[in-house]
Amino acid sequence: MNLTPIVAGNWKMHKTPSEGASFIELTKNLLLDIEHVSVIFAPPFTGLFDLNVKPPFYSAAQNCHWEQTGAFTGEISVSMIRDCGAEFVIIGHSERRHVFGESDEWINRKVKAVLAGNMKPILCIGELLNQREAGQTELVLKSQLEQGLAGVEALENIVIAYEPVWAIGTGVTANANQVESAHSSVRNILKELYPESDTIHVLYGGSVKSGNAEELIQIPGVNGFLIGGASLDVESFASITRTVETVQLRTL
Ligand code: PEP
């Protein structure tokens, strides 16, 4: 199936609301003719409100709480995010898992809350370096997918992002064989859980930049990117998006 690729920029804790809004305007101006890529901006919560985006541009939150309201100081619910105009929520990013200690159980609650709120989770999965070195990559991906998606009936509104933790923010990109093999594992695991899984996006994330985007997007099973560092720079982010559009156009 030829899915419209996704290029998503995870800004992490960067950019004030006004910096973010002008970044988005500049990026859109550089990408006025983009038609075959969905472009997602994921600013911090403070930068989400009332962003001037419409397809093929979308916005995403980087996290959420699973409850709708309540005594959860410092947390943000799905309905609050949706009311800002966002369509996606990144769930289970490796920094949430490994810096803030989020468990698969929490991640699962968040995935279900996002779906229940008629939004789309971008569920991040990926192995640590020691897990890869111990030959456990597939096991980790299976466990994160099974636990993260427990109780989820259909995959149609879900995006998966495969992000090997050792490649995030390190400048080290997984090589083509590693990416292809991990994406094929993800597809096989999903297929066992959901027969319709061919229709969902599996993104790659981990030190994607303009210099490696063309090679990475052509790897079988890669339906786009989740990008950290390179998404903070207008020229890099636009150039990666343009590369993805060019490669996609060749397949149409
Ligand atoms: C990320 O934060 O999801 C990510 C992939 O970061 P980077 O592109 O900087 O490796």
Image: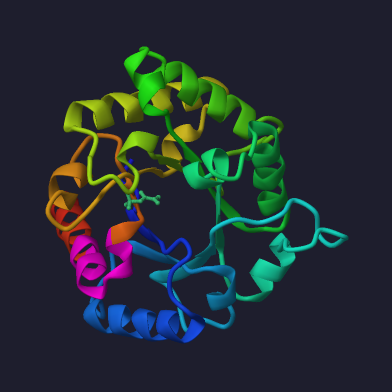
Q: Give the answer, above or below, for where 225 lies relative to 61.
A: above
Left or right: 24 with respect to 76?
left
Range shown magenta: 230-241
Task: Please name the residue shown 46% across and 69% down the image.
Answer: 58
Task: Please name the residue shown 70% across and 33% down the image.
Answer: 105
Task: Please name the residue shown 67% across and 53% down the image.
Answer: 114
Give the residue at the far top of this rendering. Answer: 134
Query: Depth check: 89 or 97 in front?
Result: 97
Query: Depth check: 144 or 33 in front?
Result: 144
- Quarter of the image where one finds residue 10: bottom left
Magenta-drawn stretch, dominant element (helix, strand or loop): helix
Q: How many marks?
A: 0
In the image, residue 9 lies at what x, y percent? 38, 61
The answer to whether one can see residue 164 in this image is no
Q: Give the answer, above or below, for where 54 lies relative to 77.
A: below
Task: Please name the residue shown 42% across and 35% down the image.
Answer: 198
- Quarter of the image where one finds residue 46: bottom right
- Quarter of the image where one finds residue 239: bottom left
Give the residue at the far front of this rendering. Answer: 99
In the image, residue 80 lies at what x, y percent? 71, 69
Query: Depth check: 132 or 217 in front?
Result: 132
Left or right: 211 with respect to 43?
left
Taking the magenta stretch, the answer to whether it contains residue 237 is yes
Left or right: 30 with respect to 66?
left
In the image, residue 236 lies at what x, y percent? 21, 66
Describe the colour scheme in one phrase: rainbow
In the image, residue 36 lies at what x, y percent? 28, 63
The answer to whether one can see residue 162 in this image is yes
Taking the magenta stretch, the answer to whether it contains residue 97 is no
